[in-house]
Amino acid sequence: MIETNLLFDTSPALIEFINECDKLGFKNNNSLEAMNFKKTIEDRGIWFATYVNDKIVGISGLHGFRDGYRALYRGAQLYSRPGGLSRNHMNCWMFYYHLPAAIDLVNGEPIYITTNTDNDASGSMLRLNKLYYILEKNGLVDHVSNEEVFGVNQNIWKLNKERYLEVRGEE
């Protein structure tokens, strides 16, 4: 069974997920501190976790950013969603399950997603950054700028919510 829930506190499933991230070399998700888990909650942010058979397979945060919210913060997944590659990134647990929940929570305010351009703390962040240029061509996001966010050079993308929901409904 697949379900996505909000996380407000640590749990055995979260600790197990963090341990798996550590084994996979995901430096931004190998501890509560690296994730900024408690700080995100203290700053009125939230965490989403997608579970498959009671095991977390994907996690990401949502917090205030600019004139809206930053979604997919510290996002990590243990493996991709079944079904193979997707040109619209719907094979990603967080992109598929967390963004609709975020859209529901932000009451129409803009949603931004950031991608690292220089620092690759997991071995896949730079590939993800390249993927967002494809998502931009497909109309799912718009590139806003390239700037330093929390001390890391990142591309900032604005989610085109209507197009995202349209494409998600087709997948």
Image (cartoon, rainbow, N blue to C red):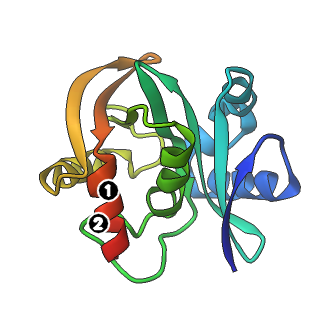
Q: Which residue is found at the position 16% from the left and 57% from the top?
A: 138
Residue behind mark 1:
164
Element type at mark 1: helix
Quadrant location, the C terminus? bottom left
Q: Which residue is found at the position 47% from the left and 70% from the top?
A: 80
For the question of whether residue 35 can be seen, the reply is: yes
Q: How many marks?
A: 2
Q: Image height check: is 126 above or below 98? A: above
Left or right position of 166 against 57: left
Residue behind mark 2:
167
Q: Which residue is found at the position 66% from the left and 55% from the top?
A: 49
Q: Disc 2 residue type?
A: Val
Spatial CA distance of label 1 from label 2 is 5 Å
Residue 82 lies, in percent from the top left, at 47, 81
Element type at mark 2: helix
Q: Image height check: is 148 above or below 128? A: above
Quadrant location, the N terminus? bottom right
| Of 110 and 91, the residue lying toward us | 110
- Residue 8, image quadrant: top right
Residue extending farthest to the left is: 137
| Of 153 and 134, the residue lying toward us | 134
Q: Answer whether labels 1 and 2 touch (C-beta < 8 Å).
A: yes
Left or right position of 142 against 158: left
Q: Disc 1 residue type?
A: Tyr
Residue 160 lies, in percent from the top left, at 28, 45
